[in-house]
């Protein structure tokens, strides 16, 4: 990459990453009302009952074992003094770091600055990430993504550093120990090794990527409980998740009243964008796009396996938009970069308005349901009354609030 273009790309990456946290800056008056919700209370209750050592390795909510996330979560709670606004700020800082690593990654594959900027803003500004960026329990997904991107950068170095293999292994283990979905990170990077042009030591590098997945999967299988597996339900849930996200909520005017119609409409659009992006992409960028397709597919499979009992409507939940946006952004950016400059500016402007403008309306509703109502219930409800989707009562919440200084 030429120095001038490299410098311009760096400016685009930094500016887009900063822009991605603007919703928190402009709407902080709503974010400040958010409070501990559902899994947050289960984490606090488990920590208080079991003690730190036992709690770290206790399977959480019957889903998985992720001690690294728990220790980081506990450290963030201590660091912020129990402030949920402080925890939310940490969530958004992690999001900004992911955008920086992602933008740097796109630049390493030779993507044009316009494509990088559009990809980052599509991923970083979308209001549909509201649950991921408005509920601190979702920090586990962001940490897993952060470690995955770090591992990807290490793999690109292709053994130039003696510490590279160890760093890659550590990052992939860390991704898996932060989120049960992080286990797929090693498989996705193994796909990248197979499709990239450089073939030196390909088998060894694939094994290096797969080893953390095998290790953590074995541990999870031995120590974490498992729900009943249903192949048909898993496939249907995974398919709906893969086809409908991330466009289902971003383009509501295209929805129809019957499920099959939505699958056809959004499936055709997403497929067309992916195929067109591959045709227009430079050869150096195609390994990146193939890897993003693999991430989208493997993540859909993992979501289908874990979440099918929750029902099909949850397949388009806002907590599951982060990865689809991450995978879709570079595809859309590749197409945008092929337009004339005027068309690029107009398309980017309209897209950003569509992505960012609804933040104001949705965060107001979110801060009421996930903040004001919860705070009021804790203060006023009878001690034995449940106020939250979890089993926590108002009396137990008040105990935890005093013990950990929650505010």
Image (cartoon, rainbow, N blue to C red):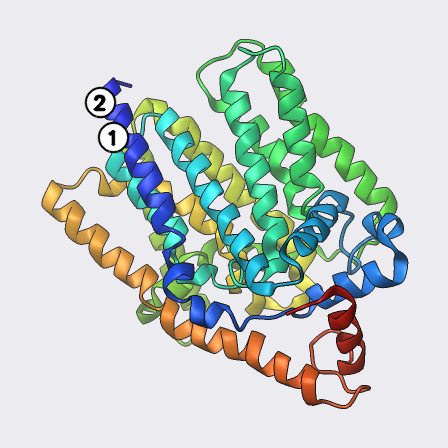
The x and y percentages for residue 377 are 66, 85
**Picture quadrant of residue 44:** bottom right
Separation of marks 2 and 1 at Cα, in angstroms: 6 Å
Secondary-structure class at tag 1: helix
Label 2: few (<14), some or many (≥20) within 10 Å?
A: few
* Residue 274 shows in the view: no
Q: Is any part of residue 395 visible from this angle?
A: yes
For the residues bearing labels 2 and 1, Cβ distance under 8 angstroms: yes
* Quadrant in which the N terminus appears: top left
Residue 43: give x, y in percent of width and height.
75, 61
Question: Is residue 323 rendered to the left or right of residue 268?
Answer: right
* Residue shown at 51% from the left, 69% from the top: 32
* Residue plotted at (59% across, 58% down): 87
For residue 155, above or below residue 96: above
Of residue 157 and residue 222, the one placed in the foreground of this image is 157
* Residue 187 on image: x %, y %: 62, 33
Position of 77 with respect to 282 (left or right) is right
At which x and y percent is residue 114?
Answer: 24, 38
**Residue in view at x 84 percent, y 51 percent:** 52
Left or right, residue 241 beside residue 67 = left
Residue 277 badge? none
Between residues 258 and 370, which one lies in front from this camera angle?
A: 370
Mark 1 lies on residue: 8
Front residue of 124 and 224: 124
Rendered-image quadrant of the C terminus: bottom right
Per the rendering, the mark at residue 4 is 2
Which one is in front, 205 or 138?
Answer: 138
């Amino acid at each position: 990459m030429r120095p001038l273009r490299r410098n311009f790309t760096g400016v685009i990456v930094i500016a887009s990453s900063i822009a991605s946290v603007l919703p928190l800056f402009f709407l902080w008056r709503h974010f400040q009302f958010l409070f501990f919700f559902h899994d947050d209370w289960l984490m606090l209750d488990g920590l208080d009952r079991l003690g730190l050592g036992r709690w770290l390795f206790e399977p959480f909510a019957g889903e998985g074992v992720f001690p690294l996330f728990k220790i980081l979560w506990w450290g963030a709670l201590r660091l912020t003094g129990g402030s949920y606004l402080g925890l939310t700020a940490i969530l958004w800082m992690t999001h900004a770091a992911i955008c920086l690593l992602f933008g740097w990654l796109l630049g390493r594959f030779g993507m044009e600055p316009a494509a990088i900027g559009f990809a980052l803003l599509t991923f970083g500004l979308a209001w549909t990430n509201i649950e991921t960026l408005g509920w601190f329990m979702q920090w586990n997904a962001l940490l897993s993504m952060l470690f995955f991107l770090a591992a990807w950068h290490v793999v690109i170095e292709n053994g130039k550093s003696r510490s590279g293999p160890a760093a890659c292994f550590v990052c992939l283990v860390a991704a898996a120990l932060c989120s049960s979905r992080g286990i797929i990170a090693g498989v996705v990077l193994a796909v990248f090794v197979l499709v990239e042009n450089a073939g030196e030591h390909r088998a060894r590098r694939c094994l290096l990527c797969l080893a953390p997945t095998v290790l953590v999967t074995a541990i999870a299988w031995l120590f974490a409980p498992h729900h009943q597996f249903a192949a048909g339900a898993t496939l249907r849930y995974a398919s709906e998740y893969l086809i409908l996200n991330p466009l289902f909520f971003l383009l509501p005017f295209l929805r129809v009243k019957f499920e099959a119609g939505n699958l056809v409409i959004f499936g055709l659009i997403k497929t067309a964008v992916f195929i067109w992006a591959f045709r227009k992409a430079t050869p150096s960028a195609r390994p990146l796009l193939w890897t993003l397709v693999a991430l989208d597919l493997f993540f859909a499979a993992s979501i289908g396996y874990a979440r099918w009992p929750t029902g099909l409507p949850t397949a388009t939940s806002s907590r599951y938009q982060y990865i689809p946006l991450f995978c879709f952004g570079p595809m859309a950016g590749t197409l945008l970069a092929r337009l004339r400059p005027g068309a690029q500016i107009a398309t980017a402007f309209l897209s950003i308005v569509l992505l960012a403008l609804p933040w104001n309306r949705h965060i107001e509703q979110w801060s009421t349901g996930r903040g004001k109502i919860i705070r009021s219930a804790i203060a006023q409800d009878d001690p034995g009354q449940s106020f939250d989707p979890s089993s926590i009562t108002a009396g137990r919440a008040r105990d935890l609030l005093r013990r950990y200084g929650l505010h």
